[in-house]
Image (cartoon, helix red, strand yellow):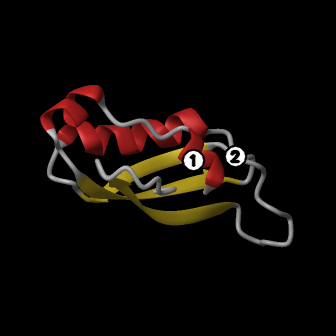
């Protein structure tokens, strides 16, 4: 999660317009650590924020490899990404 947070950016035009929202994304990480796919489960209502949530995942890939202890060939994760103009820093 910390890795993803480092790649989060607030779209300049959305910040300027005072747009806020929460995007819920589902994504799959292959055993190699590469993001295989991502999709928006719940939109923020603003396409700029929605696209940034997907772009953030692309920028943060590849992740560490999926541990061998997990018998699955991939991990499927769901993550809420919050875009807030509140000065209190949040991971997502």
Residue at figure coordinates x 78%, y 72% from the top left = 70
Query: Which structural element holds mark 2?
Result: loop
The residue under label 1 is 4
Residue 31 image position (x, y, % from top left): 73, 54
Residue 41 image position (x, y, % from top left): 30, 62
Residue 65 position (above or below residue 76): above
Q: How far is mark 1 from mark 2, CA to CA?
A: 9 Å
Which one is earlier in the sequence, the residue at label 1 or at label 2?
Answer: 1
Instruction: Tell me the number on the disc at residue 63.
Output: 2
Residue at figure coordinates x 35%, y 38% from the top left = 52
| Residue count near mark 2 (Cα–Cα under 10 Å), binned few <14, some 14–19, many ≥20 | some
Residue at figure coordinates x 36%, y 52% from the top left = 39
Quarter assignment of residue 50: top left
Task: Find the residue positioned furthest to the top.
Answer: 12
Residue 49 image position (x, y, % from top left): 27, 42
Is 41 situated left or right of 27 in this image? left
């Amino acid at each position: 999660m910390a890795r993803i947070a480092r790649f989060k950016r607030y779209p300049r035009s959305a910040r300027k317009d005072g747009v806020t929202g929460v995007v819920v994304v589902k994504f799959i990480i292959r055993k190699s650590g590469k993001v295989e796919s991502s999709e928006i489960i719940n939109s923020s209502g603003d396409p700029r924020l929605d696209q940034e949530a997907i772009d953030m995942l692309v920028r943060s890939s590849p992740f560490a490899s999926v541990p061998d202890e997990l018998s699955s060939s991939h991990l499927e994760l769901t993550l809420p990404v919050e875009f807030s103009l509140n000065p209190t820093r949040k991971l997502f």
